[in-house]
Structures are given as structure tokens and as C-alpha cells.
Image: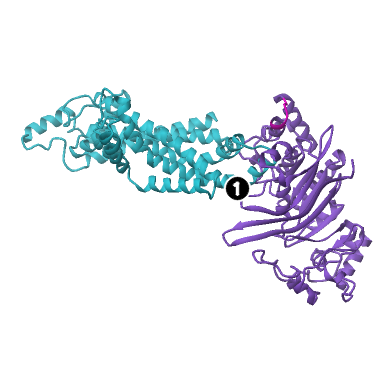
Chain colours: A cyan, B purple
Amino acid sequence: MAQYITKRVVMAIVTIFIILLMLFIMLRFMPGSPFNDEKLNDTQIEQLNEKYGLNKPIQVQFFNYVINVMKGDFGVSYSISKDSDISVMLNTRVKVSFRIGGQAVLLGAIIGLLLGIAAALNHNTFADTLCTVISVLGVSLPSYVFGLALAYFVGFKAGWLPLLYDEKQTFLSSVMPTIALCMFTVATVARFTRSEMLEVLGSEYMLLAESKGIYGPKLIYRHALRNALIPILTVLAPLVVDLMIGSLVIEKIFAIPGIGSLMVTAIQSNDYNVTIAIAFIYSAMYIFLMLIVDILYGIIDPRIRLSNKE
Amino acid sequence: MQDNYILRIKDLSIDFQTTAGIVHAIRGVDIDLERGETMAIVGESGSGKSVTAKAIMGILSNNATVRSGVVEFHMDNETSETVVDLLKMDKKEIRQNINGKQIAMVFQDPMTSLNPLMTIGKQIMEGVLWHYDYTKEAAYNRALELLELVGITDAKKRMKSYPHQLSGGMRQRVVIAIALACNPNLLICDEPTTALDVTIQAKILELIKDIQEKTGISVIYITHDLGVVAKVADKVNVMYAGKIVEKGNIDEIFYEPKHPYTWALLSAMPDLNTNDERLYALPGTPPNLLQEIKGDAFAPRNEYALKIDKRLEPPMFKVSDTHFAATWLLHPKAPKIAMPEALQNKIQRMREGA
């Protein structure tokens, strides 16, 4: 197991490094520069480039950047908010996005799992059909539909929850965006759980467990759910990243100061450092989650764990 | 003890609800099994052998409905003996009182019948921990004892293995160990050797026979392989299209078969002691059980079918106290038709060989 994990960690680090390199090169080749301002003359732009080291060869820039990132310094913003430290800029926004996204994933995964299990256990009954309907709705309706509906009915008409994000009531403000964001996860997880559980429930080892006399929650948890879990984990992991990094539309609806909207502004204004920093957080999280999932696979399934031994 | 029966199935009928309609999978099955006896249920795929076994175990799928019948099981506790109808018990009652403790089952494919995520030790221990107040240690020792009983060497090391680390034959031994964990009185083996190598088959059959001698357990074999039947069974039930068409002692079925279907099955058995180039194959396919069957289900494939076979279903005719067959050929007014000559010769050779 230790060897399996070490191998995965090394691969993760290498991947992150390659991603950083590609991000860096691709952004430098984008048209324009951070200083596309008519008021600036050539010498001023020259000075700015000199100041931020953008006139050096790209390999030197990359080398310096990597060294700084390792120190935890993502550089400063060029244009959005001049010269302010990106680590500081992102700090509050990341917290808000992670919180809402994390809540949405947790809620979505739990409800989705329960729905999927209930549907599989009551296969071809009303409960099963209901679960299928919810899944189809959740997958096909975009999250802003739920967001707007919630904002209108719960936030505006009933006035139960703050309509817009309020720094003083962070939890209450996060409820509606969380619900709106979790619908897709609920639907996806429910759908996968249902089909995986149905397959597992029809397997011979379930019959064997039943013929031992096992029944009830223990039968479902010990024999069925664990076997159904691997494909569910596989679909859940990318959803986690998608939600944690924040959704632009949901952030706009509820006026949330998250990283989704910052990313879009940064790309539009060629603010290299901000864009790379956000993209880097995104990919690093993705890789980190994949690493966790890989390790979980190994914990759940001995066939994966042991095949790596030899 | 009034009688020596452990299991009596009377007039069992089971339907399956499918998208194509209702399938009458079992159409009035009667089976009697005595204590310590080994009985085989033989038939083609889809004849309803496995469904009968699943009905006894209470593990029928959700789309099955029991139309009629009783499954009387003689529960044997240390103090008393009670007769229960397994079909009248709900799932929870069966799981608590019958499965594992009274009746256990060995499944066809050991590749798929073990939980891939649990060590085999845990899977063997699970039953006793679930049904009785065993301590972990006691359960562990019991599992070791069982692994040794089923002939697995290096039992201590094997307890920690996962199913995928074992060969097919080993896995089937583990499945047998799981079945025996709670000392059941009846063991149902659903094609226990079909998925195994021929060389392993004989060993598994010997193992079950051996265990039976040691424990006095009753065994039901479900198989399509008459070779297996000949090796292990005391009594044979031949099943066709959801019905028992012939039943009798092993000698009666092998040496004096009366039903044309049994003739066909025996003729289709490979035989090395003959110069015949061709192996007999039964023409046609079993009937579609979606439709109501008129007359004898076997009639369309039966070259000895009489006119009455197409109209009326034959009842069970008594041949001897233990031997019954459902064919009009046994009716006193029926024309005297003997079994095919090739089969007579084959049986002659089998008698000499035995």
C-alpha cells in the first residue's frame, strides 16, 4: 500500500509541474498584454515590462515563477488591482468558494447516495421512478434555474434567506447557492448509485450473502454498497473540483465574492499572474482529488491494492 | 420422529413476471427428500432446477410469484423438531432461522459467488458471527477448522487472502466452507462443478461426498450432467419444462428409465466404450414457458409421442414403490414401445461396467 501511494504522489507532483509549464506558455502566447491601455506610451509599457520582468526570455520567467510558487508566492496582479499580492487577493475569495462548493458536494453526495440506494432497493416501483425523474431534472436543468427559482421564491417572496451574499451572515447566505449547486451532484450520484447498486444486487455474491442469512442494513452496507462505490467515486471526484472552484453564474446571481468571476475578469484583462494562480489552484485540486480517489480505490478494492504489489 | 423426511415439496408452481409476459417456470413440482439422502435434480437449462432451489432458500428474485404449493421443511433443533412451510415465512424469518443454519447453498460459479472485497476468512466467519454469539476468536477457529475440512492447506495464510488470489477449485472449496459454517442439515448444490475444470470437478464431488459421510447432511444436487448424478446421487428427479417427469432410485433411472426424455438424456451421454461415430443429440428446444402448455410438454420433441400426448398431460405412473414416470407409454392401453436399441446396449455396458 505504501508503495502504491508513493507512486501516485510522485506522479501527481510531476503532473502539476507539467501543467504549470503549459499554463505559463499558453498564456504568454495569448494576444495582447496586461498593459493594453491607450494612455500608456511605448516607454511606459517598456518600463512596466521591465518592472515585472516580462521582457526576459520566457524560460527565465518560468524558472523565476516556479521558484516563487514553491515559496508560496504567486506574484502580484498587473492590472485588475494593481500591485496587490495575489495570495491576499485570492485568500478571502477561495474561502467563500470552497465553503459553498464543499457544502454543495457533501449535501449532493449524501442525498444522491440515499436516493440511488432507495431506488435500487425498490426497483421498478414508484420510489424508483421518482428517483429517475429527479435525476433527469437535476442533470438537464442548469444550476442557475434552481438558483433563480430559489432566489425568487425563498429569498425575494418569502424573505427567509438573504437574497444576496452578506458578509455578516455567511452561513445563511450560503444556503441557497449550496442547494442550487448541489442539484447536479444529487442527480449524477443518484443515477450512478442506482445503476451500480442494481448490478451488484443482482450478483451471485449477494445471493450467497443472503443464503448465509444476512439481511437488512448490514447486507446493503457490507456487501452491496462497498462494491458499488468505485464507479460512484470516479464520477464524484471531478464534480467536487467543479463545485469548489465556484460557478460564475451562481456567483453572479447571489453576488458571491468567489473565484469564478475573478477568473473571467483576469483572462479578459490578460492579468497573467491571477489567471495562472487560479488555473493552478484548479488543476492542483483536481490532481489532489484524483490522488485521494486513487488511494481510496486501493483501500476499497484489494484487487487494485494488491496488483500493484508485484 | 414420525417420519424421516427433511424436505417435502408439494405441487410447487412459480411464475415470473417479465416484460414479455408471465413465464410459468415451475408447474407443479413434487419432491421428497429423506434425511441423509442425496438427491439429484437433472434437466436442461431453463427446466426450472435452479428456481426450485432458490424457492427453498427464499432467494427468489422480486419478479417471481409462488402460485401454489408448500415447501415443508423439518426443522431440527437440539430439543425439538418442527415442520415449517418455507413459503409461508417472510424473508426476515427465513434469513434468521433457515438460511445458513438449516439450509445452505453452493452456487454454480465460484468466480462470481464470493464477495471480491472481503477476505475469505471474513466471509467464512460472517455466518457464525451473525447467527450465534461467537467471539471473534471462536469464529476464527471455526473458520480455520472449516478450511481444513474442505481440504485447503495453509489455512491460516488463506484466511487473509482475497477471492481473486485463489483458483476456481479453491474458491469453490471456500464456498462450501461458507455453506457448512453453521452446521446446516440440508445442502443445496446448484451445479457446483459446472464452472470448474474436469480434473477439479471430481475432487469437489468427492469432497462433498466425504463431508456428507462425516456430517450426515442431506444434499440436493442440481445439475445437467448425468455423469455427476451417477457419481453422487441416491435418488434422481428428472425435470423438464418446470415439471418432474421421472423420479426414482439411481439404478432405476440409469438402468430402467421409462420416460422418453430420460432415454434421450441417457443417449446423449458420451460413452467411450462404443464404436459409434456419432453422439446422440436431442432434436429441438425446450418449449416456451410463456405460453400455456397443452398436453405433454415433451411431445413435440418426442419421437415416441402418442396422439394423446398432444391433448392431455400424462399423470405420474407408478413403476415401483420408488420409481415414477409421467408418460402415457406406461398406461396399460398404450402400445408397447421399448427404449431405443442403442440405449439398451449402452445400459447393458453400464451394468457390466458397474
B176 or B32: nearer the viewer: B32
Question: To which residue does mark 1 refer?
Answer: A202
Q: Position of residue B88 (x, y in %)?
A: 71, 45
Up/down of B263 relative to A203, above or below: below
Q: Position of residue B127 (x, y in %)?
A: 70, 34
| Residue found 87% across the figure and 69% down from its top | B330
Q: Is residue B132 magenta?
A: yes
Q: Is residue A181 magenta?
A: no
Q: Which residues are magenta?
A: B130-134
Residue A88 figure quarter: top left
Residue A78 figure quarter: top left
A307 vs B9, left or right, is left
How many discs mark residues in the rendered view?
Answer: 1
**Element assignment for label 1:** loop
Up/down of A101 relative to B221, above or below: above
Is residue A204 among what the camera can see? yes
| Residue found 76% across the figure and 53% down from its top | B222
A28 or B191: nearer the viewer: B191
Q: Position of residue B242 (x, y in %)?
A: 73, 60
How packed mark 1 is, by other alpha carbons closer than 10 Å (few <14, some 14-19, many 20 or more), is few
Screen quadrant of the N terminus of chain B: top right
B275 or A28: nearer the viewer: B275
Disc 1 residue type? Answer: Gly
Residue A273 figure quarter: top left
Is residue A260 among what the camera can see? no
B295 vs A63, left or right, is right
A291 or A48: nearer the viewer: A291
| Residue found 62% across the figure and 40% down from its top | B116
